[in-house]
Image (cartoon, grey):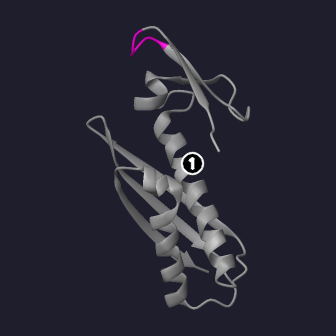
Amino acid sequence: MKRKGTAVWNGTLKEGKGTLSTQSGVLKNSQYSFSSRFEEGIGTNPEELVGAAHAGCFTMQLSANLTKADFTPGKLETTCEITLEAGTVTKSHLTLTANVPGIDKAKFDEIVADAKKNCPISKLLNAEITLSATLV
């Protein structure tokens, strides 16, 4: 399987503007700029997209792991915070709230740790990956 994303940028770093699009069309000419990346401007930025990708990938991996272990997950909600320092993505912190009927905390922690380690985006990132997980 291969997936594509496309970036178009016009102009200098600070004054220029760009658009991001995805093969699926979910993003189509979505705006990004210096201000949306480094300040609080309108538009998206690569770091928030990486955060969404990591949260989505981890959550799907966790669902697969739970199902394989004969648990039926209820709601799994993950937020991912990406840290960019000195031009490098240094950290990805996942915050999970999970409803998994019938699972004990030890088994939950084991399955969550495996999902964190083995989701494809975790494997891609060359950054410290941390996790806070709450079983509700």
Camera-side residue of 8 and 86? 8
Identify the residue at horizontal 70%, vertical 76% (top origin): 73
Quadrant of the drawing holding the N terminus: top right
Residue matched to label 1: 52
Q: Residue furthest left?
A: 86
Dominant secondary structure, magenta: loop
Query: As displayed, is residue 85 above or below residue 75?
Result: above
In the visual, does 28 lie left or right of 132? right
Query: Residue 13 magenta-drawn?
Result: yes
Quadrant of the drawing holding the C terminus: bottom right
Identify the residue at horizontal 65%, vertical 70% (top origin): 64
Query: Residue 122 magenta-drawn?
Result: no
Can residue 69 be seen in this snapshot? yes
Does dot 1 land on a helix, a strand or a loop?
Answer: helix
Identify the residue at horizontal 70%, vertical 26% (top origin): 28
Can residue 39 be seen in this snapshot? no
In the visual, does 19 lie left or right of 28? left
| Stretch of the chain drawn in magenta | 12-16
Identify the residue at horizontal 52%, vertical 74% (top origin): 112
For badge 1, the amino acid type reads Ala
Q: Quadrant of residue 103?
A: bottom right
* Residue 53 percent location from the top left of the image: 56, 48
Q: Residue furthest front?
A: 1
Query: As displayed, is residue 5 above or below residue 131?
Result: above
Crowd class of label 1 (few under 14; some 14 to 19; many from 20; radius 10 Å): some
Query: As displayed, is residue 62 above or below residue 25?
Result: below
* Residue 15 percent location from the top left of the image: 43, 11
In the visual, does 1 lie left or right of 96? right
